[in-house]
Amino acid sequence: MTNNFQFEFNKYINQKRLLKKIFDETLIACNEIAINDYFTKDQFSEIWLKEEDEKFIREIIETPIGIVVLGTKSWAKALVVNELLNCPLLPIDTTAKSNPWRTVRCLYGTQTVVSLAVDHCYELVEHLAAYDQVWHTIPQSDLQLKKGDAKAIRDPGYHLATLEVKLPHPLLKDDVQIMVSPGLNDFDVIYSCCFENINPIVIYAISGEDECLSPLDVQQLSDLRLKEPKIPIFFVRTKEVVTQPLTPTISYAEFSPSELTESQQHWYYRQQSAAISSSVTNHSPPDSPLVLPSSSLPNTHFEAFHQNSSSLALHQQLYNLGYLIETRHHMRGQLTNESVAKKSRRDYFFDVSSEFVDNFNKFSTISVFFRNILRSNLVSAATLLNESHNHCLRMFILTAHDMTWDLQITPKRIEYVKQREAELFSSLMAIANKKQEEIKQLISETIDFMRSDILNQAANHEFTNPIINFNNISARELHNCTDEIQDLVLTLLNSAIAKKLVGSVDYMRDSFIGTLERCLTLLEASCQEAGDPPEASDALKQILNAAYTIE
């Protein structure tokens, strides 16, 4: 299982490097576009990544992966961590319920080092029990937050200090961290300790002793739902008692040696002697109670029914909290396509569904859950970048198309307008030549009709530059007066002739419309006999009136 984890994380790191390169090149290209003013501000806003999108991508490519182990039972969380690392790093003691554990952070290091740190940067000068002995499992005293401790009273940050464990483990080598939540009731503190500055993959350890979620479990999951509504969680139910060899087991304390078979008694005494000799040779904390493999004990139908019923109760609670779907046949994490609407953190385009494993023997399925989340992160970030690239390419293509259109179509449009103007001028000249006699007659009739009126207006006309001495009129004054009288006569004639021409056109229009109206009236009369409503004539009148108004 560790090899599978290592393969997935290594592949994720390589793809994340490539994604970071694409992201950096995208920012450089966008800055170059902004500097050179290729597009307007509105067009550029469609290309540039939005602030929340850029923040999401940076979280994917810059923050490390953090496997966050949540739960209310410290030994259940320790079991999950030991199974992930495939080594007994954390002690498993189901009886230690009085003192909760502090936050534990597992990092990669060339040597195994244990220290207390605050905010992942300040190391506390604190003497730990691990410094005094050779250990394979971290001493429980270094993990516990002792109530009423004088150190905690003097130093308020004592409870917030994180136990950092650096290990030369292949799982942690690819910038992966494991965060174990502290045993505190304040979820805001838990969230700040475990979820900041990481890209989380959440595991929630449920004790095998519990048939349903405790009120504290429900409260923590509800608070997490409020802070991270779309984050998927891998729920795993542990066994009641588990050995350090990391296999699901049942405690021998439930059975006396006389109740065991001969082979089981032989295994029991051999394990007991091995434990005693190990405690003498190794400086390590007291071992957890000896256990028998679950495969060596009878599995009754009652136990199977009891486990199934409690799993159903847990599944129902998780469903009510909104983490699981209704049926138990679809608990596996899946990538589901979502709409491309802009969303909040870890809610982009692809969601991974939560998963519930009620049998710790199936804990290895978490590798599929890890793979889905890692792929979801990469696909979501790549989709955002791809959208930005598509917008940019579309903008360049449309701009190039518009330029080509202008270069090819605009000269043709100008040539077409010139051609149509020449045709219109020729048509007007032809009409004028054909109607020249009629126009001459119209002009002569107008002059004869307006002769007396024109003479009266010319006699009463007031010149712009009045003549002072009528006895001695200069040639210049005479020329100016002649021009003014000529302009007056031409203006009056043009106005009168234009009115007659327009009147003739209106007469033709009225005649044309009247002919159509008469035809339509006859048609409507025949339609009325058939029972159809007469609406055609009114519609035609409105259309023609609107058309002539526009002209």
Image (cartoon, rainbow, N blue to C red):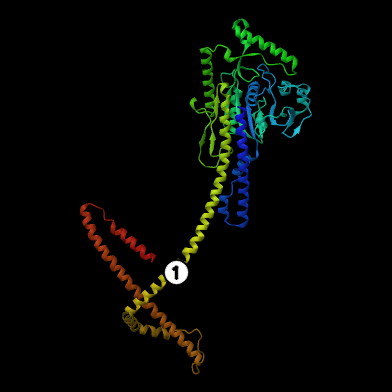
Percent x, y of residue 155: 77, 28
**Residue 229 appearing in the image:** no
Can you say whether 300 is above or below 420 in the image? Answer: above
Between residues 373 and 502, which one lies in front from this camera angle?
373
Tell me the element at label 1: helix
Percent x, y of residue 108: 69, 32
Between residues 150 and 478, which one lies in front from this camera angle?
150
Tell me the quarter of the image containing the N terminus: top right
Residue depicted at x 22% and y 60%: 522
Tell me which corner region of the image, top left, top right, bottom left or bottom right, holds residue 229.
Answer: top right
Percent x, y of residue 548: 36, 65
Density class for disc 1 (Cα within 10 Å; few <14, some 14-19, many ≥20) is: few
Residue depicted at x 75% and y 23%: 130
Tell me the quarter of the image containing the C terminus: bottom left
Residue reaching furthest to the bottom: 471
The answer to whether 535 appears left or right of 175 in the picture is left
The answer to whether 5 appears left or right of 425 in the picture is right
The answer to whether 534 appears left or right of 162 in the picture is left
Residue underneath mark 1: 415
Percent x, y of residue 181: 66, 27
